[in-house]
């Protein structure tokens, strides 16, 4: 049976599209989280939609589970293969297929790197708004499968808003051409949006049509030190109500310490604070922004602040926010990526703060996030002398307390990182039993044999 399976595979893919080498298995069987041990049986590298169809039909014939894999920058274990699954890597499906000038749309294969899409948009004098620290490695297919967010959601929304077409191959081997580049389409249920954020559990994405937009004007970046969370929310309200914001990010003093430990850089603020806000706004509103800066100082919403005077300085200010994940990575962070409605943030933040101090007295906890979207990343760092399993168990124990609070506030246990393996046990805190039942039924329709990313999102 085993050799029949391999022989059959060799009829549909060339030898260089199939790998069972240990280093390849280890690399492609994992994602950025690194909390789970990879154990795939094989890695496949399709080059075309036909290859993907053939792989799915092969998997159906031999009842073989598949794990789709993009740039492997995911933070929920959604691209991890830990049970001898076959990984399907999209990195060789990396072509740009078409640019439509009139529609300002770009059609690409799923393996194109996110940053390359930004660059291609720039070459056309246009803009692709998805942006985050992993954009140099993540792939657009993985971005679609996680409905990626990032630092500009406050103005541009999540990736979903920029997708007008998707081609997918479902778990039954059927090809669906969804959306087809249409801006308006109310013909029946919106299946395209069902696949966005489905973490590879309903179908493999083989083609994406993205809408681009006009280039934004130059921006100013502000970095403020903040005395407390109450002041942070007042600052948010002041700036959000008066300025065309492009980003409103928050991080703690502890986050800055980790960034500076990893890559020492002089810190631009004299007066440090327990919290920081990084704000990006259009340069045309600079005067208004400066007067808000003064008013924030007078009202003691901020302790100190700086405004960028060049794009180089803006990038330096951004680096304190963008390098946080990288600097925490060696400490094996247990990640929580939660969201609540923005108006509930002040109460939510102070309740969360108390719980974290009480429940994790011995663990360093680092917060940062896209406050402008009601989204916080809470990272619990592993003490050096604790083993991974013990650490995981301790974090999971506290999760029930954290997520009960999320539930009380009507929030989400996963704002932008997806569910994967990490948040699977907690989905019921954000979705009702009925919702979960419908989701499982949808999964059964598109993937009745359960070959697509089994065990992710729910069992
Ligand atoms: C430093 C850092 C910063 C980050 N910041 C952000 C942020 O601000 N906002 C944010 O949203 N995320 C952020 N992330 C998380 C991550 O970059 C995103 O989730 C990203 O969209 C994942 O893309 P990927 O190509 O790496 O996907 P992978 O990690 O490879 O996979 C993610 C999911 O997509 C599925 N998948 C991949 N390709 C396909 C396909 N072609 N068809 C079907 N399913 C597929 C996988 O099976 C998996 O379920 C960050 C990560 C890092 C490391």
Image (spheres, rainbow, N blue to C red):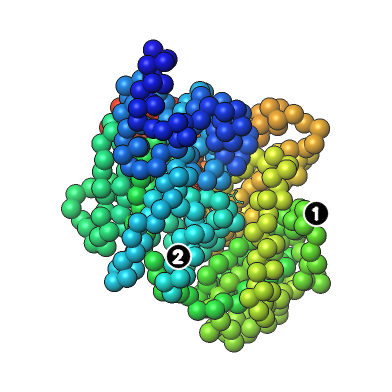
Q: Is residue 272 above or below residue 458?
A: below
Q: Which mark is residue 138?
A: none
* Residue ID at (41%, 53%): 95
In terms of secondary structure, where does tag 1 sit?
A: helix
Describe the element under mark 2 as helix, strand or loop.
helix
Chain-order first, disc 2 or disc 1: 2
Q: Is residue 323 left or right of residue 458?
A: right
Q: Residue at x 35, y 37 (%)?
A: 52
Extreme residue in the bottom direction: 287
The picture places residue 181, in percent across and down from the top left corner, at 27, 59
Quadrant where the N terminus is found in the figure? top left
Identify the residue under disc 2. 120
Residue ranking furthest to the left: 187
| Quadrant (top left/top right/bottom left/bottom right) for the C terminus | top left
Residue count near mark 2 (Cα–Cα under 10 Å), binned few <14, some 14–19, many ≥20: some
Q: Is residue 436 above or below residue 239?
A: above
Residue 428 shows in the view: no
Relative horizontal placement of residue 227, taking residue 90 as reference (left or right): right
Give me the C-alpha separation between circle 2 and circle 1.
Answer: 35 Å
Residue 31 x %, y %: 57, 39
Task: Identify the image quadrant of residue 97.
Answer: bottom left
Tell which of 348 and 450 is nearer to you.
450
- Name the residue: 67% across, 81% down: 309
Q: Which residue is mark 1?
A: 261
The vertical placement of 278 against 207, above or below, is below
């Amino acid at each position: 049976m085993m050799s029949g399976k391999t022989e059959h595979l060799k009829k549909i893919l060339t030898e260089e599209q199939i790998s069972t080498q240990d280093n390849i298995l280890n690399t492609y069987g994992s994602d950025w989280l690194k909390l789970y041990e990879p154990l795939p049986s094989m890695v496949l590298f399709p080059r075309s939609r036909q290859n993907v169809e053939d792989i799915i039909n092969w998997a159906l014939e031999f009842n073989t589970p598949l794990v789709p894999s993009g740039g492997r920058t995911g933070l929920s274990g959604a691209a991890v293969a830990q049970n001898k699954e076959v990984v399907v890597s999209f990195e060789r499906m990396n072509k740009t297929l078409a640019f439509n000038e009139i529609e300002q749309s770009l059609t690409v294969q799923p393996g194109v790197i996110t940053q390359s899409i930004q660059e291609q948009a720039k070459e056309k004098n246009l803009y692709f708004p998805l942006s985050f620290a992993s954009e140099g490695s993540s792939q657009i297919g993985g971005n679609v499968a996680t409905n990626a967010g990032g630092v500009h959601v406050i103005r541009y929304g999540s990736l979903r808003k920029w997708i007008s077409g998707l081609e997918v191959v479902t778990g039954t081997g059927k090809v669906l051409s969804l959306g087809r580049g249409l801006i308006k389409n109310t013909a029946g249920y919106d299946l395209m949006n069902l696949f966005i954020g489905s973490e590879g559990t309903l179908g493999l994405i083989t083609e994406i049509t993205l809408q681009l937009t006009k280039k934004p004007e130059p921006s100013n970046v502000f970095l403020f030190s903040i005395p407390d969370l109450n002041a942070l929310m007042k600052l948010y309200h002041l700036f959000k109500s008066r300025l065309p914001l492009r980003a409103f990010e928050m991080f703690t003093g502890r986050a800055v310490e980790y960034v500076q430990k990893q890559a020492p850089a002089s810190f631009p603020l004299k007066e440090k604070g327990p919290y920081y806000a990084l704000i990006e706004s259009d340069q045309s509103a600079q005067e208004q922004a400066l007067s808000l800066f003064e008013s924030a100082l007078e009202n003691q919403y901020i302790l100190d602040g700086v405004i960028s005077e060049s794009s180089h300085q803006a990038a330096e200010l951004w680096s304190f926010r963008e390098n946080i994940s990288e600097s925490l990575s060696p400490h094996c962070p247990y990640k929580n990526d939660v969201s609540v409605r923005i108006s509930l943030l002040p109460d939510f933040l102070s309740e969360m703060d108390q719980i974290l101090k009480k429940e994790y007295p011995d663990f360093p906890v680092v917060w940062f996030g896209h406050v402008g979207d009601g989204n916080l990343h809470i990272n619990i760092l592993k003490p050096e002398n604790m083993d991974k399993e013990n650490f995981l168990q301790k974090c999971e124990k506290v999760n029930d307390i954290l997520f009960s609070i999320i539930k009380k506030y009507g929030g989400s246990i996963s704002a932008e990182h997806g569910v994967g393996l990490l948040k699977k046990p907690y989905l019921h805190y954000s979705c009702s039993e009925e919702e979960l039942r419908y989701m499982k039924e949808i999964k059964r329709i598109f993937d009745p044999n359960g070959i697509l990313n089994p065990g992710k999102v729910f069992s």
